[in-house]
Image: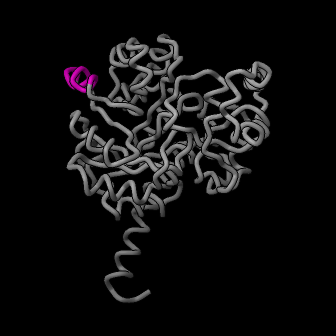
Amino acid sequence: MLHTYLTETWNLRYPIIGAPMSGPGKGCLARAVTQAGGLGMFGAGSEAKLEMIAQEAAVARGDDQGRFGIGLMAWALEKRPELLEASLEAHPFMISISFGSPALYVEKAHKLGIYVASQVRSRAEALEAEQAGVDLIVAQGTEAGGHTGHVGTLPMLQIALESVQVPVVAAGGIATARGVAAVLAAGAQGAWIGTRLLASPECDNSEEARARVVQAQETDTVLTRAFDVAQGLGWPEKYPGRALRNTFTNQWHTQVEALPGNEEARKQLKDAMARKDYDVAFIYAGQAVGLVNEQQPAGEIIRQLGEGAEQVLRERYNSLFSGSL
């Protein structure tokens, strides 16, 4: 059995956290990840309804009072502090507050016995999160799906591990047992997994979306602001989103500044989202999408990643230190 902060202190069977993917990642997926031995999360986006948070928390908790986490964005909380209050009222095991400073919110969570994590994309953000008193830092690389920064996972993980004393987990581009083993070997306390779960039936997405994820290759993503700008969302410019390329990004990725005044393009995206037409509508996914080869239950994925990482680490340890390949 693997032994890390997540397994020893949080008593997880596997040191794996399901990323809080706003949209496809809701209570059903969070519950499946937790039941398999990880920690499942769901996301509450900037426009989330407060009743959604309560509803998805109830699904994630289940009848057996299972643990779960909720992901929030600091920039959104500045405009809608009620998102935090609703999340705290749901009493999750953990909340993550990222994309801005978590400093104003950590004490509130701790008073309720709730752990706080924060995704970081630079040394400065890692130090800021540590100073704020978070319990867990997520070193997120640009390979990650959804909103992220511009530094790769491996350098970001090393920077975080050498800069802070808070437990660190790695996010971005991790989709196999080898990936989990790699970040654990480097010193991470666990892996934060999103893209690998996008083709799971527990995701709140469509059959067409899951099929596109399975078909996509690692070269089929783009880090873009096009979808955020076209929707009029308030995402800070320094946090673009990694999504599957489609006709919308092909047309607008390099001319995002023209989108706010183009009502036709904005309507085109809105209509496509309603129709689930992914030639235009977005599917946020990371570069690890090239490793998602089939639709698979989330619990099965978590167990394979956890058991497989242990096996990989044992085999590599034996080969590296015995001198035999």
x and y percentages locating residue 277 in the rendered image: 79, 31
Q: Quadrant of the N terminus?
A: bottom left
Q: Please report the residue visible at 28 percent of the width from the left and 53 percent of the height from the top.
A: 4
Which residue range is magenta in the image? 104-112
| Residue 178 locus on image (x, y percent) | 48, 63
- At x 39%, y 26%, the residue is 74
Q: Is residue 113 above or below residue 317?
A: above
Q: Is residue 324 left or right of residue 230?
A: left
- Residue positioned 31% across, 49% down in the render: 168
| 16 versus 236 height, above or below | below
Depth check, front residue: 33 or 229: 229
Look at the magenta stretch and give its main secondary structure.
helix
- For the residue pair 212 and 281, the one nearer the viewer reads as 281
Q: Is residue 162 visible?
A: yes
Q: Nearer the viewer, residue 105 or 79?
A: 79
Q: How far across and down, in percent of the image, does residue 115 sit?
A: 27, 32
Q: Is residue 14 visible?
A: no
The answer to if 110 sits in the magenta stretch is: yes
